[in-house]
Image: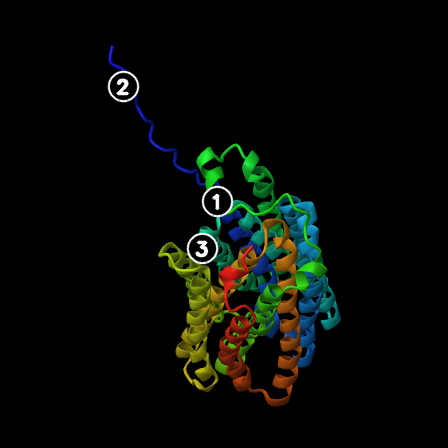
Amino acid sequence: MKLETQLSPPQKPTFMRWWVCTLLFFATTINYVDRQVLAILAPQLQKEIGWTEIEYGYIVTAFQLSYAVGLLLAGKLIDFLGTKRGYILSIIIWSLAAMSHALARTAMGFGIARLALGIGESGNFPAAIKTIAEWFPRKERALATGIFNSGSNIGAIAAPLLVPVIALNFGWQWAFIITGLLGFIWLFFWIKMVHKPENHPSVNAAEAKLIKTDTDFDDEKSASLWDIIRTRKVWAIAIGKFMTDPIWWFFLYWLPKFLNTTYGLQLDKIGVPLIVAYLIADVGSIGGGWLSSKFLQMGWSLNAARKTTLLVCALLVVPIYWVSGMAQLWPAVLLIGLGMAAHTGWSANMYTLATDFFPKKDVGTVVGFIGMSGAVGGMLMASATGHLLEATGSYKSLFVVAASMYGIALLIIHLIVPDIDAVKS
């Protein structure tokens, strides 16, 4: 009898990691919807409540301050609790804080609500980046990060669609309440769907093997925050975030006011330009992650892939230098969108550097620290912007700063870490 050996085809990895990435995308979307509501309503609330540009700057600063402090604590807390429980705690706090804005009647009241929102929202990125490190091999992390980070732009798109409709029909208070409820809907899916990849019933052996491609030393004791901040590599990312995150915060909180002041757009007309700008930004987030991952697939070194992508993003920001001198709305919106796209591509790769430089067990702490650095930069930018606009009424110097920061930041990153491959985890 002739024996025939039949070889079964190799097992293909399942796609559970991408469903997890989808949940991270929606969490980040809700995160940005909740923080964007105030920016969209700001021109109306400024007239109704009567705050000054300086007071609005302080309201924004209140969020940045608590967000910065929260990030420093949230990263370590999420490393301790784990991503599932850490995310649950974070989104409950920020959803309740978002809804509490409806109770505010003074600039001080909004400042207190923003303080609470910053504490809750500070858990999103440490938890999301740590989840990416747990669920994705290094070659896929930049793309996965770009995809979930694009939720920040979708959130900023959804907010101009939802908020004016709710505010004009039901009152501005309901805009905060309804958007705040979205987080509790997300919680149901997160609790039901997400477990550790090695124990997940929907992860087959091939996907588990793929996830474990870049095994780091999970059996070692987690590093302390002091050990982490003594390394050059964490300061490379932290300084880069400190210099460039404020530009994103500027767009997030002052773009609606810029469009209102410069082009006379009211609440019922401001949605479309904001949506276009953030749609362009969304392309940048996914594109920046894809480009970096593509370079790696082509055989480029980690150093060349990450830094070339950062350079492309830095160059694409430069044209916003000319925005403040434009008399026409749409050329300005398109250039702003390009600058925002460059930032989101930059941000996706900056977060991915944290997973390149550090083992998974420390990623939450690292992302918390670098996020805090970005938030401190944003806090300083917010206060300075409020004082500058109150004194001059001109946005020109702000766009000049925005156009130049990324190139300077990349130079500093390169000087601190000349070769990423030599210091990766």
> 263 or 146: which is nearer to us?
146
CA gap between label 1 and label 3 equals 16 Å
**Camera-side mark, 1 or 3:** 1
> In the picture shown, does residue 401 fall above or below 360?
below
CA gap between label 2 and label 1 equals 33 Å
Q: Which residue is mark 1?
A: 213
- Residue 397 x, y percent position in the rendering: 54, 86
> 219 or 410: which is nearer to us?
219
> In the picture shown, does residue 181 fall above or below 5?
below
Residue sitting at x 47%, y 55%:
147
Q: Which residue is mark 2?
A: 4
Q: Residue furthest left?
A: 2
Q: Earlier in the sequence, mark 3 or mark 2?
A: 2
The mark found on residue 366 in the picture is none
> 153 or 164: which is nearer to us?
153
Q: Which residue is mark 3?
A: 143
- Residue 136 x, y percent position in the rendering: 50, 47
At label 2, the amino acid type is Glu
